[in-house]
Amino acid sequence: MKKLLMIALAILLISSMFVLPVGAVGEGPNYNGNETIKNERLTSHEDLVKQIERAAERSPNMEAEVIGQSVKGRDLYLVKFGNNPDNPTILFLTQQHGNEQLVTESALNVIQKLSTNSRQNRELADQVNVFFVPRINPDGAIGDVDFDISDHIAGGTSTRANANGVDLNRDHTNLTQPENQALHYNVLQAYDIDYLVDFHHQGARSAIDGKLVSGSILYPTNEGVDPAVREMSKQLGKVMYDAVESRGWGLLARYPGGTANTIARNGLAYEYGISTLLFEMRGMSDHVNPNTILGQKSNGYLIQQGVVSMEAAIAAIADGSINEADTSFWDTLPTQYFMPQE
Ligand SMILES: [Zn+2]
């Protein structure tokens, strides 16, 4: 009987990961202080490494490369699908902030799908290079850090900064941290990258028009960024925005971001001429502020939001349709604001 119960529970858990709740949108189930936050269902560092290595073994078009180590010595990976320098290249970067986890699940999902030996994947590999740096902050992701995070709501299962307490997304000009040195020296400076999406999670109470959003996006806004680079960023944003909006369960806002080059969205566009897009998903896995936390019931559609937007970007770059994307929607995309809990 106990065994049956466990099986039923397991089925429930699995289905809640993948079934998209109807009308979930940004209005999906929330952390209200009475819902347990369980992060064990997220992929561990060890399983992430296994999944990446297996995908690379399975696919003739995929390679996994260790680009460095975190402060605590965890291997950092670059996954490369497609290997033709004449083709356009897009890089998906996830989890600079350790407590922003689901975007890494999205990346692992897309890596898995690209690793199968289908005709579609073989054709894609002839058209586009798709790179991933998933979970650049593995120490923060499991709260293995050299500072106290016991004040976090979920008990410090994960945190924003790296093990040294440095916010990696404020370190892109100084490169003081091993994670950023690995990313810059062994990826950004080693390859010719055209597009980059920097995936994050934001607070759970951002809204437009009185509705909570499922995410937000922004192109590089530093005035030193080449206008042509910025325009391509806006096109990337259009493609990913349309992919989410067309599903009916997503609602995206414009992210109210600044112009500093210490963050990836601006700094990488400015320094390397990469067309960058910031993509923020709703809610974090652990934090001191309850307004940022999102319970796990929303995981399924947020992971899917990452998957469908990544796949749309890959397809549009592969067939060149991204170059026709109309960027005028940016002029009317509402900027999100904070909506307090009722
Ligand atoms: Zn972040």
Image: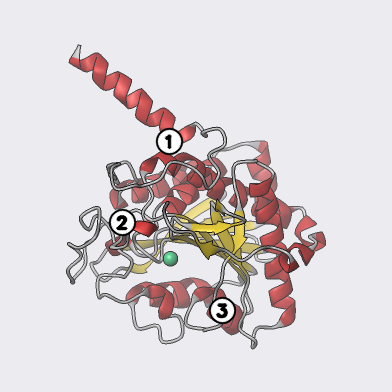
Observer-side mark, 1 or 2, equals 2
The amino acid type found where label 2 is placed reads Asp
Residue 266's mark? 3
Q: Which residue is mark 2?
A: 286
Spot occupied by residue 58 in the image (x, y as percentages of width and height): 48, 41
Q: Report the Cα–Cα distance between label 3 and label 2.
A: 26 Å
Disc 1 to disc 2: CB gap under 8 Å:
no
Height in image: 295 above or below 289? above
Mark 1 residue CB less than 8 A from any atom of ligand 1? no
Q: Secondary structure at mark 1?
A: helix
Instruction: Decide: few, some or many residues near mark 3? Use Cα within 10 Å; few <14, some 14-19, many ≥20.
Output: many
Ligand 1 occupies quarter? bottom left
User: Which comes sooner in the sequence, label 3 or label 2?
Assistant: 3
Spot occupied by residue 170 in the image (x, y as percentages of width and height): 42, 79
In the image: residue 178, left or right of residue 193: left
Residue 17's mark? 1
